[in-house]
Image (cartoon, rainbow, N blue to C red):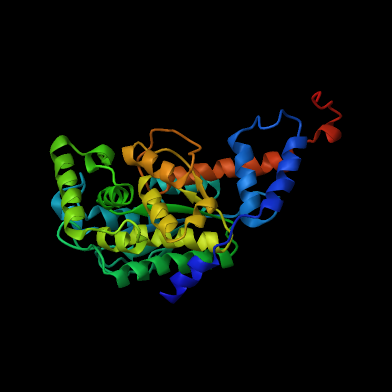
Amino acid sequence: MELLTRTIEAIKPLDHEAIGRVQSRLDNLTKPPGSLGVLEDIVLALAGITGRQPSAPLRKTHILMAGDHGVAACGVSAYPPEVTPQMVLNFANGGAAINVLARHAGVELLLVDVGVASDLPDLPGLLKRKVAYGTANLAEGPALTREQATAALEVGIEVANDCVRRGAELLGTGEMGIGNTTPSTAILAALSGKPVREIVGRGTGLDDQRLELKIKAIEKGLKINRPDPEDGLDVLAKLGGLEIAGLAGLILAGAAARVPVMIDGFISAAAACIAAKLNPQCRQYMIASHLSEEPGHRVMLEMLGLRPMLTMRMRLGEGTGAVLGMTLVDAAVKILNEMATFGEAGVAESLQ
């Protein structure tokens, strides 16, 4: 708990002087003011987060947290729980979508077992930081104890801190866990007060029958557990997700270290909502990569005050949208540093 408390307390406001300096350069580049839209927003955010003008493509590390969910026993997923460890093996062997996109974007990929319900072999790029063998079934009681939730948050903090020590300048959030759109939806319902049927999605492609099972499991879990929406740790513990907790810790650690965090889709946004409940200032350190097809994702981004850069009808998870978003950060930094100013190019500025 000490590490979590220390991290939460270390998060400070953005550096507005640095933002001003970068805004001045942007306004002197050979373009109408603001005409590059989100690309300009990105470098302004980087300046405020880091306190300096980004001068080269950032060193990028994407962290994929894996964990299982007891609520999968309620038939809330189109896939069996055995797929979680099988996909971790696929990630380690380089065969998943996230591997392809990470290679494309020049992003280091780090895998973390924070709660897979089986023992994994030693694998390249895999950190074994298991807090528990999956969560309990949220439809029958708390998914995690408060102590387990704290431990998983601190795994995320420790992993992020180590990445930063090794030179990471941009962190990405990704996850794997069969059934994890169910606790994510439950977290959103608890924090927003919205009806489950209004925000629930089909996850990996549920038919109508399984969708009803998912809705009933979430509604039952909310009724039984009565999570306190003002207590982020209570919501996290009762509704669960060890990988969600790990990602929330990662986000908090990034903010404390003044390192931007690229948020992926629905499950990552659930983690972001928990992190923001623990310290609202961490929202300023997040960059939203894309808008997921999950209906609740838009609600989460609105709660966080974030605008997604991409809308690509994606709903895979793993952090695929986050890694694509990192390529736009590279583009934005290059624009800032490689584009000529009006004076350098000998181009007349607009009439005032």
In the visual, does 267 lie left or right of 51? left
Q: Is residue 260 visible?
A: yes
Coordinates of residue 328 in the picture (x, y in percent): 57, 40
Q: Which residue is nearer to you in this view: 104 or 65? A: 65
In the visual, does 19 lie left or right of 184? right
Q: Indicate the quadrant where residue 22 lies.
A: top right
Q: How many marks?
A: 0
Quarter of the N terminus within the rendering: bottom left
Q: Which residue is nearer to you in this view: 283 or 163? A: 283
Q: Is residue 101 visible?
A: no
Coordinates of residue 121 in the picture (x, y in percent): 32, 67
- The answer to whether residue 214 is above or below residue 115 is above
The residue sitting at 66% across, 44% down in the picture is 333
The residue sitting at 43% across, 33% down in the picture is 312
Most extreme residue toward the bottom is: 2
Coordinates of residue 73 in the picture (x, y in percent): 15, 55
Q: Which residue is nearer to you in this view: 285 or 309? A: 285
The residue sitting at 38% across, 64% down in the picture is 123
Coordinates of residue 216 in the picture (x, y in percent): 15, 46
